[in-house]
Image: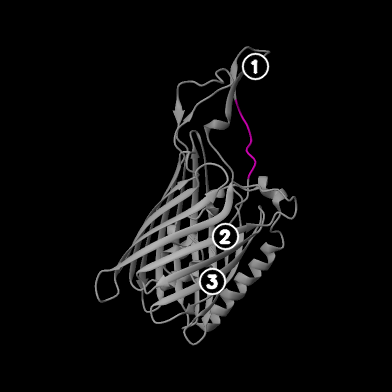
Amino acid sequence: MKVVFKKVAFAILGLAVSTSSFAGNPQRAGQAGASELLINPFARSSGWAGANTAGVRGLESLYINVAGLAGVNKTEVVLSNTQWLVGSGISINNFAFGQKVGETGVLGVTLTSFDYGEWEVTTEDQPEGTSGTISPSTLVIGLAYSQKFTESIFGGVNIKVYNNNISNLSVTGVCFDAGVQYQTGDNDEWKFGITLKNVGPAVDYSGDGFGISLPVPTSGVTRTFEERAASFELPTQLNIGGSYDILLDEYNRITPAFSFNSNSFEKDTYNIGVEYGMKKYLSLRAGYKIFDNRSDEISTTAISGVTGGITFDVPINEDGSSFGIDYSYRHTNTFGGIHSFGVILAL
């Protein structure tokens, strides 16, 4: 098993090196699509800017670092809702389920749905509107497996299906995430992690929306012509991070965390976060996302970088089962920020 893990780890590192050599290039931003794959739908991890690449555990790992999925003790269920850029009418609903299989393995399933509201239909002949509406949507489905290889090493893979539907056009793509985590110290207080996300082939849109009916001048007959759609690549990302648990006493803990995100089609980001935990009952989080604007010294996102969050966990029984309520806020320079709410049942 250790030999297999080493091969997987070296494969991830090799892919990471080859991917990062093309990363952090904002000039390539227009060549990528499926930007929904870069949005964290979970309330708990988004509260400290997603900085916990190394220490994330449970179903939140399905977005941050799939290796941490091995931290599910038996069964976990998460439901969350995100109001994205309040005022834009965009909402994100997320469902995740994790189940321990065998002694050290965990299977996870996630379903994330993006609702963009209704858009008014316009045409060349009716640019002011046709009195009709369309409702674009995006769906991301993930199937993951993670395993605890040793007391210090976790690893996992997440296969995702991305689908976007815009009236009479749609696109479907398949990609995967792979991650590794390592913890050490007398109380496993030191944690390190690396994950490669959204690796997959280029995709393109298809559907009747590419057809246009035009009259043929020589015959007067109307014929349908079909345009060609250019393919686009998925937003591959490499995350490397570390964290350290400062145990103040038996009940109180402070965990600073840091991660570096290398983006293939956007600016790189540095994520800094801190979490305070009082036993398992209360957690407070704050974070900041730093965008690498050295290439143009211009901010190209509405997200300001400031984040915060809180979690209340209520024990259900003496076996360690609990029910938790999560909230996070991500500040934006325009609109009304990003609010995420979530509930988690751990059995």
> Is residue 151 shown left or right of residue 290?
left
Q: Horizontal and vertical percent for residue 23?
A: 69, 59
Q: Inspect the image, locate mark 3, and give the three-letter code of the amino acid beneath it.
A: Pro
Of the pair 338 and 248, the residue shown nearer to us: 248
The residue at which mark 2 appears reads as 288
Label 1 – label 2 distance at C-alpha: 58 Å
Q: Is residue 3 magenta?
A: no
Of label 1 and label 2, which has the lower sequence position?
A: 1
Residue depth check, mark 3 versus mark 1: number of the one nearer the observer: 3
The numbered disc on residue 256 is 3
Q: Residue at x 49, y 66 (%)?
A: 66
Which mark is on residue 216? 1
Compare marks 3 and 1 and give the one earlier in the sequence: 1
In the image: residue 258, left or right of residue 275: right
* Cβ atoms at labels 2 and 3 below 8 Å apart: no
The C terminus: image quadrant: bottom left
